[in-house]
Amino acid sequence: MKRFGEKLRTLREQQGLTVRQLASLLEINSHSHIVGLEAGKHNPSAELILKIARYFDVSTDQLMKDELELDETQVD
């Protein structure tokens, strides 16, 4: 799950969201938690992984498994 933060940043940027906007959408009190996730300094909870997957309409496997890429249709 080393690439989770990279994938999260890609999804967020493709949607044109700021870190603060994403934190608000995911009901996270601190945008710094999103920054930490993207930087690989924090590990997401199972609940947060599910929220992110649902919001961006990707599978949890795509987020968590380093060997799986995001679908090109997801990030365009």
Image (cartoon, rainbow, N blue to C red):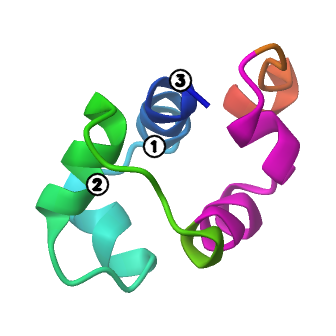
**Which contiguous range is marked in magenta?**
49-66
| Total numbered badges shown on the rendered structure | 3
Instruction: Name the residue beneath numbered marker 2.
Output: 34
Determine whether label 2 and label 1 are within 8 Å by CB: yes
Establish if 43 lies above or below 23: above
Q: Main secondary structure of the magenta part?
A: helix
Q: Residue placed at 81% from the left, 13% from the top?
A: 67
Establish if 49 lies above or below 69: below
Q: Quadrant of residue 9?
A: top left
Q: Is residue 42 left or right of residue 53?
A: left
Q: Residue placed at 50% from the left, 39% from the top?
A: 8
Determine whether label 3 and label 2 are within 8 Å by CB: no
Residue type for callout 3: Lys
Q: Quadrant of residue 54?
A: bottom right
Instruction: Name the residue beneath numbered marker 3.
Output: 2
Give the alpha-carbon distance from disc 3 to disc 1, as whole Å.
17 Å
Image spot of residue 42 (x, y percent): 31, 49
Image spot of residue 7 (x, y percent): 56, 29
Nearer the observer: mark 2 or 1; the answer is 2
Front residue of 76 and 46: 46
Image spot of residue 36 (x, y percent): 22, 45
Q: Residue 12's mark?
A: 1
